[in-house]
Amino acid sequence: MGKIIAIGGGEIGKTKLMPDGTFKTFPIQTLKIDKTIVQMANKPRAKVLFLPTASQDMPAYIQLFSQYYGNKLGCLVDDLQLISQTYTDEEIYSKIEAADIIYVGGGDTRLMLEVWHRHHLDIYLKKAYENGTVLAGLSAGAVCWFEYYANTDYMEAENLSLDLLKGLGFLSGFAMPHFDILPSSLKQDIISLLKQRNLSGFGIDECAALVFEDGKISILSSQNGKTVVKLP
């Protein structure tokens, strides 16, 4: 059927201003995975559509992605800024339909899905998936394709318990990104909740990806020791 690459986390290279006034440069950590995404499109110069909704269309993220996938990976890059810009339904669908690869950035999964539903992206993306467009993403952009993901807001809020929230459901089960760096208590809470709900899923490490291609599942890693854990 379709192609989905769900990346647990990792940097694509950026420079960040630190609290002490210095700048820190982060390395590119997912290059092997990103090259595979481009290869899966099987086009001389793939057209990539970046969806930065989860980061609220952060300009620096959009620029970084465009430079990385455009200059380094040789793609034609476009973006769809649903929060900061206004489009007609026809314009949105045209961007989705024209893409060989649709890449979803990280950030707030719940916000992203709410915005997508308002603009009918759940419908447009499902059609793109069925037509063979490569769907990919990191963190929020990884878990959105599954039936369920976890709300982790409860770790910072009072009177809120861990629960499962609904994703797009293109892939069955549950997914959790950044799995290798999560607190052990959160991992145990997730496992317990999945057992209660009689659900299974995946914990995806940073710099690792779960690849779904035409009904087959494989694991791709850009760093030694990074992998995907079957849950529960």
Image (cartoon, helix red, strand yellow):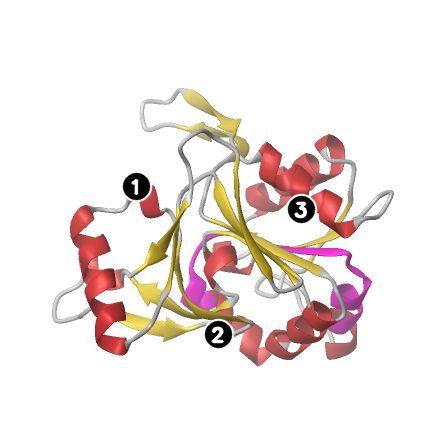
Amino acid on which the number 2 mark rests in the picture: Glu
Looking at the rendering, in which quadrant would you find the C terminus?
bottom left
- The residue tagged 3 is 37
Please indicate whether residue 139 sits to the left or right of residue 213 in the image. Answer: left
For residue 95: magenta?
yes
Residue 196 image label? none
Residue 134, position as x, y percentages in the image: 69, 57
Which of the 4 image quadrants contains residue 57? bottom right
Of the numbered discs 3 and 1, the one sitting upstream in the chain is 3
Nearer to us: label 1 or label 2: 1
Sequence-wise, the earlier of marks 2 and 3 is 3
Residue found 42% across the figure and 68% down from its top: 110
Image coordinates of residue 154 in percent, x first then y, are 21, 64
- Using a 10 Å C-alpha cutoff, classify the residue at mark 3 as few (fewer than 14 neighbours), some (14 to 19) or many (20 or more): many
User: How many numbered discs?
Assistant: 3
- To which quarter of the image does residue 31 belong? top right
**One can see residue 102 in this view:** yes
Sequence-wise, the earlier of marks 1 and 2 is 2
C-beta proximity under 8 Å, tags 3 and 1: no
Q: Could you tell me residue 213's position as x and y percent?
A: 64, 58
Residue 176 shown left or right of residue 66 in the figure: left
Q: Residues within 10 Å of mark 2 (few under 14, many from 20)?
A: few
**Label 3 residue SS:** helix
Look at mark 1 in the image and give the residue it sits on: 181
- Name the residue at 26% across, 71% down: 163
Determine if residue 51 is in view: no
* Marks 3 and 1, how far apart at CA: 24 Å
**Residue at numbered disc 2:** 114
Q: Which contiguous range is marked in magenta? A: 93-111
Q: Specify few, some or many for label 1: CA neighbours under 10 Å numbering under 14, 14-19, or 20 or more.
A: few
